[in-house]
Image: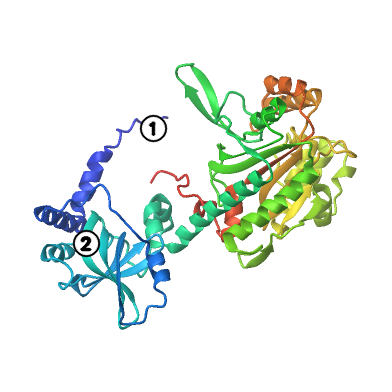
Amino acid sequence: MTEPDRPPRDEAAEYRAAAAANQFRQARIEKLEAMKRLGVNAYPYRFDRTDLAAAIEARHAELPAGETTAETVAIAGRIRAIRNSGLFIDLHDNSGKIQVFCHKDYLPPAELELVKLLDLGDMIGVTGIVRRTPRGELTINATHVEVLAKALLPLPEKYHGLSDIETRYRQRYLDLIMNPESRATLRKRSGIIAAIRQHLIGEGFLEVETPMLHGILGGATAKPFVTHHNALDLDLYLRIAPELYLKRLIVGGLADKVFEINRNFRNEGISPRHNPEFTMMELYQAYADYHDMMKLVEDLFAAAAIAANGTTDVTNGGKVLNFAGPFERRSMVDLVKDRTGIDFLELDGPEAARKAARDLHCKLEGHENWGQALDAVFAEHVEKHLIQPIHVTEHPRDISPLAKAHRSEPRLTERFETYVNGIEVANAFSELTDPQDQFERFEAQVRQRESGDDEAQQMDTDYVTALEYGLPPTGGLGVGIDRLVMLLTDSAAIRDVIAFPTMRPA
């Protein structure tokens, strides 16, 4: 039985009803109308600001208590406190707080009337003279006050801040206003990305852009989002990885080193470590292998840690993580053997591997091959124990269709993933450059899709054709920016480090 069609929501009507019922909003509307009667435009076009609060504080750090300067400044920000009927205002900008003194000795009568109409949360511009009060508070004696945006809704109560998790993520603007920790995290994120970009450019990498819309699903093992191009009447995938396009650029000789920092999209669950859209840094370096990529990861992570915290020793979840390389390097097979006593290289065929995985209480669907069974055991019994940064090397060939086979063990590949505090943060290969081998790997992936694995990759004959023109020995690396930021900012969930995470409708 199908659910009957529901009438569409009239969101405009809901908004009007909620606004009319909000008594605090109505009180502010009345003040807005009073401002209009004073001839004040509460939403002007611009304001000539000369300084940030922190710069004024730094400039006058030695100003004695009770002293007044001859300096006039213009500041702007949001009102976070009003005392003595508007005589004192705490104004916050993105650098910090400064006190404003609104007195009849400095302000004209019309602007004193305007100050009476101000509320917490209003945005104002202030021009005035810098002084330090007898109590030592750096203050601006206001000679001019201008409304820059009348806030029609009150801020959350300041002593409790904004603690509701759902509201913090859905109304990130409120979270950023009320919680300095959230602002600090997202600012650190920006610094981390800048440090990675700067390091790569310094190493001779060329920053590039590749398509977000893909005709063929490839470059990673994941479920895609599907969209439709109307003019071409063509279904397309939002990209799950830029890998195959980036390697085409190496084939074409655009540069020997290329990188991209951009969004990927995977149609999978939401969890503390997963968001459907996420930021990746992916790069490729000709004439290099996965050993070179390990060193590059260590250099990038150290640079990012220093950019975020000024040190390579980072506290996360009460643990001190050391991001100064070199990191430990261990094979997946050896780590599984250490934890379970089972050497998967001694198991012959997928059935024996599946049995071993089931005996270790791993959940399987039944179609897993040897490599997938090994990976399931690793995920269940090993990952959570990998606290300090470590490169987990030699991943199974079955689950690494784009990586070169290991030089001494054909069931494995020259691939590693970097784990920190139980989280996978980087994935890298000695890239597969043999077009015939690559074609056979794609065919194996197609067979896996046909057997029920909807995350397996598709056949990409154009990419095989590109390889037939010659891809030099190449090392490739992908770094999950969001997860790295989580680790470097001591954030418990990926939603804390993404400004606007994907949310279920309210």
- Residue for point 50% across, 58% down: 185
Lateral position of residue 25 relative to residue 390, left or right = left
Query: For mark 2, what is the residue?
Result: 145
Mark 2 Cα shell of 10 Å, populated few (<14), some (14-19), many (≥20): many
Locate residue 23, reporting x and y percent: 19, 57
* Cβ atoms under marks 1 and 2 closer than 8 Å: no
Q: Label 2 amino acid?
A: Val
Q: Label 1 amino acid?
A: Glu
- Residue lying farthest top? 232
Query: For mark 1, what is the residue?
Result: 3
- Residue for point 41% across, 55% down: 168
Q: Is residue 107 above or below residue 174?
A: below
Q: Is residue 376 above or below residue 4?
A: below
Lateral position of residue 241 relative to residue 2, left or right = right
Mark 1 Cα shell of 10 Å, populated few (<14), some (14-19), many (≥20): few
Locate residue 459, reporting x and y percent: 69, 23
